[in-house]
């Protein structure tokens, strides 16, 4: 059991949820890696336990008329039934309804409580899940127990896992489970069904169900939901106590930006993980002033601390084991040395992308869990007031944390920190 709160559940359901582009990874990566950057767009389908459905002629992307012409707004586009040039003519249709699976069905018994283990196996999307007519109780995040938190829906970003309790306390029937993407305007949805034993109800159109979920741009919900998750520090499954601020050897301040990279250079401005303000810089050095493609001669990349990571020709572990090129493992190249057994803080400052939008990101720390001391709006400056706001009493422990957004439709009024 995760904790005493899950010891008496009647059963468990594991729901991996993923975003699916109807194209090969090679096609998508080619556009993303070109200097003439081609965005892959939002996913075509969201899958729940590998199952998804898409109307081939009328969907969230385009609408086709009776002659087969498909329009996305005012632009004509190729529909799902169009045969790509690289597929031979004898290849089956790309959109054959007979191949579409039914919705995933979770069978429950009235009056029983179940554990839903939700996994965001997506590449891009922040998912929000809700169940028609039912509330959810968060009891675990990323494999670590939490205090029970009741909510109508849950957010979970790429790589995050969250477990919730659901009690089958409604009238015997069949209810809709809905997953929607958030933080991006191209909202995608997927559905599964919660079916009570003895129900004969048939759901022909799950999209018609009325389910309370936050809007795609409701970053207030994002902040509140994350802030309301507290770690469990009592009982047989209690988490280890949070180290005091006095134990912190260094507080890394990492600015997350999107910028254009000059060939052969891995940084812009004045790189720093010691000060957010130093990293942001002034004038031409600011991140938003490094977004010019210069005639498609500069790659669009993500930077951390104003440095963008370049994969070495020799793997890092091999460099260390064979003592080859260890001098390359420096802060100038995006490597940060820490000591075993010591305590470090890390502040991740979100910043508007080149289009001015505060994107939502998931950050994973490989091989280690960490205490999430808080989620805050604005820009971090290291003031005593900001440090005092850190939760050192009952923060959750995770291995993947997400940054939030700011502003109307996630566009802040001024170029500054999007939260940390």
Image (cartoon, rainbow, N blue to C red):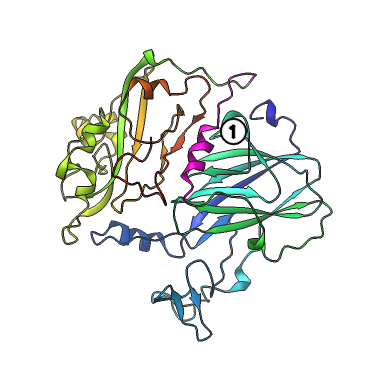
Q: Residues within 10 Å of mark 1 (few under 14, many from 20)?
A: many
Relative vertical location of residue 88 with respect to residue 253 in this rendering, above or below: below
**Residue closer to the observer: 30 or 186:** 186
- Report the residue at 30% width, 30% height from top: 253
Return the residue at label 1.
Answer: 140
Residue at 53% over, 35% down? 142
> Residue 337: within the magenta?
no
Which picture quadrant has residue 306?
top left
Q: Is residue 280 left or right of residue 70?
A: left
Q: For the N terminus, which image quadrant?
A: top right
Q: Position of residue 205 (x, y in %)?
A: 67, 65
Is residue 324 in sight in this rendering? no
Extent of the magenta region: 217-236
Can you name the residue that lies furthest to the bottom here? Answer: 67
Q: Pick out the residue farthest to the right.
A: 198
Residue at position x 38%, y 61% in the image = 40
Towards the viewer: 72 or 239: 72
Residue 307, given in percent of the width and then of the height, sits at: 24, 40
Residue 230 belongs to the span the image colors magenta:
yes
Where does residue 75 sit, x and y in percent of width and height?
39, 75
Position above or below: 9 against 214 = above
Q: Image point 36% across, 28% down: which residue?
A: 346
35 relative to 118, above or below: below
């Amino acid at each position: 059991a995760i904790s005493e709160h899950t010891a008496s559940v009647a059963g468990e359901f594991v729901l991996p949820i993923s975003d699916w582009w109807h194209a090969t990874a090679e096609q998508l990566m080619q556009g993303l890696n070109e200097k003439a950057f081609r965005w892959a767009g939002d996913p075509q389908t969201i899958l729940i336990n590998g199952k998804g459905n898409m109307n081939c002629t009328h969907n969230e992307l385009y609408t086709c008329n009776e002659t087969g012409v498909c329009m996305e707004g005012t632009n004509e586009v190729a529909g799902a039934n169009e045969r790509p040039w690289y597929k031979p003519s004898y290849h089956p249709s790309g959109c054959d309804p007979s191949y579409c699976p039914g919705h995933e069905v979770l069978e429950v018994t009235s009056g029983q409580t179940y554990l839903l283990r939700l996994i965001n196996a997506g590449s891009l999307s922040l998912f929000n899940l809700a169940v028609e007519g039912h509330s959810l109780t968060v009891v675990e995040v990323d494999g670590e127990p939490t205090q029970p938190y009741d909510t109508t829906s849950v957010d979970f970003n790429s790589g995050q896992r969250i477990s919730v309790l659901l009690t089958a306390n409604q009238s015997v029937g069949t209810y809709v489970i809905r997953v929607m993407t958030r933080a991006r305007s191209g909202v995608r949805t997927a559905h599964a069904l919660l079916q009570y034993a003895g129900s004969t109800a048939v759901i022909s159109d799950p999209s018609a169900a009325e389910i309370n979920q936050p809007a795609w741009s409701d970053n207030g919900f994002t902040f509140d939901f994350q802030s309301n998750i507290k770690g469990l520090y009592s009982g047989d499954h209690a988490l280890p106590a949070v180290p005091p601020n006095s134990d912190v050897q260094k507080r890394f301040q990492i600015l997350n930006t999107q910028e254009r990279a000059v060939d052969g250079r891995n940084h812009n401005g004045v790189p720093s993980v010691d000060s957010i303000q130093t990293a942001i810089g002034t004038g031409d050095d600011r991140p938003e002033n490094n977004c010019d493609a210069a005639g498609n001669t500069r790659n669009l990349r993500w930077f951390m601390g104003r440095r963008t990571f370049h994969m070495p020709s020799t793997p890092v572990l091999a460099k260390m084991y064979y003592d080859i090129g260890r001098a390359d493992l420096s802060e100038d190249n995006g490597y940060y040395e820490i000591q075993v057994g010591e305590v470090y803080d890390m502040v991740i400052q979100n910043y508007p992308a080149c289009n001015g939008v505060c994107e939502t990101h998931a950050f994973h720390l490989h091989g280690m869990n960490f205490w999430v001391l808080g989620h805050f709006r604005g820009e971090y400056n290291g003031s005593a007031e900001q440090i005092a706001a850190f939760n050192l009493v009952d923060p959750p422990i995770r291995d993947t944390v997400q940054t939030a957004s700011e502003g109307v439709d996630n566009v802040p009024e001024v170029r500054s920190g999007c939260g940390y």
